[in-house]
Image: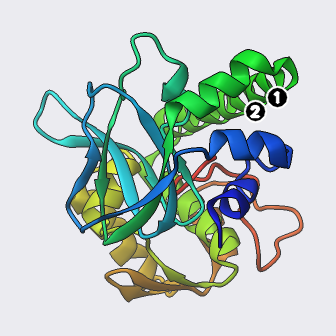
Amino acid sequence: MSVIEALSKTALFSGVALPALRVITRGTHSISVPCGGHLFASGDEAHAFFLVKTGIVRLYRAGLDGEDKVYQVLGEGDLIAETAMFSNPCVYPLSAQAESDCDLYRLQKEGLVELATNDSRFALYLLEQMSGRLYQAVNRFDHLTVTNASQRLVMYLLDLIQEQKSHWLTLPVSVKVLARQLNMSPETLSRLLARFRESDMISGRGRKWVISDAAGLCRVTNLPLPDPMSSMAGGQFFRCCNFG
């Protein structure tokens, strides 16, 4: 798949015409980052944004307590740091680290900024898309601060059902990273998974899980059942793993 084709499949650029995509992708090249390697660190000058071809990348910032605060986990087809291209000073607000071996497209800042400067329709389109993402971020913050730990976990699992189109789930990151993303300790997450497993609502271990009673998970955590409760339930909640 070419970079133009891959970019056209992203939520942000799906409505962008081919000539504009050619401008955005000018000077693009492919890079590989091994598991544990960094794309960039918080505070680095931002000269490029990225499109994930394969692998998993986490966006985080080191906390004052020494623990990393995970803001987002991104995978195939996701964009990284595109909004940072318009900041002044132009620096990356978060660090990006590969959670697995990754292949990515590195797209130059200049093409995106040039197009937004010279094409008012494209600039307005970007503002519209980024405004929607801001609302999503506010909703995610609300869920992370208002809901309790068990509710956040169930909402996350329901969203994975929708995203992976199956009740047989593969967690995209380790339990330790997922716990930080869901704003809880790894011990709390492990206890919740054990509790749900003992109640026969889920089964599995590590990164492999099966959700056998999604409705039961909602009931025991006092969450509203999606209506109708389908096998692809979860779309009413926030996408912890990857909101775009």
Q: Quadrant of the N terminus?
A: bottom right
- Residue at 86% in and 44% down: 17
> Distance between the Cα atoms at labels 1 and 2?
6 Å
Residue 196 versus residue 88 in the image, above or below: below
Figure disc tally: 2
Percent x, y for residue 164? 63, 76
Q: What residue is shown with label 1?
A: 125
Percent x, y for residue 216? 63, 74
Q: Are the residues tagged 1 and 2 within 8 Å (C-beta)?
A: yes
Residue 28 versus residue 40 in the image, above or below: below
Colour scheme in the image?
rainbow
Percent x, y for residue 82? 54, 36
- Residue at 51% in and 67% down: 53
Q: What residue is shown with label 2?
A: 129
Q: Left of 189 or right of it: where is 24?
A: right
* Foreground pick, 21 / 69: 21
Disc 1 residue type?
Tyr
Residue 125 versus residue 197 in the image, above or below: above
Q: Residues within 10 Å of mark 1 (few under 14, many from 20)?
A: some
Q: Secondary structure at mark 1?
A: helix
* Foreground pick, 59 / 202: 59
Where is residue 224, by image quadrant? Answer: bottom right
* Foreground pick, 13 / 27: 27
Disc 2 residue type?
Gln
Mark in front: 1 vs 2: 1
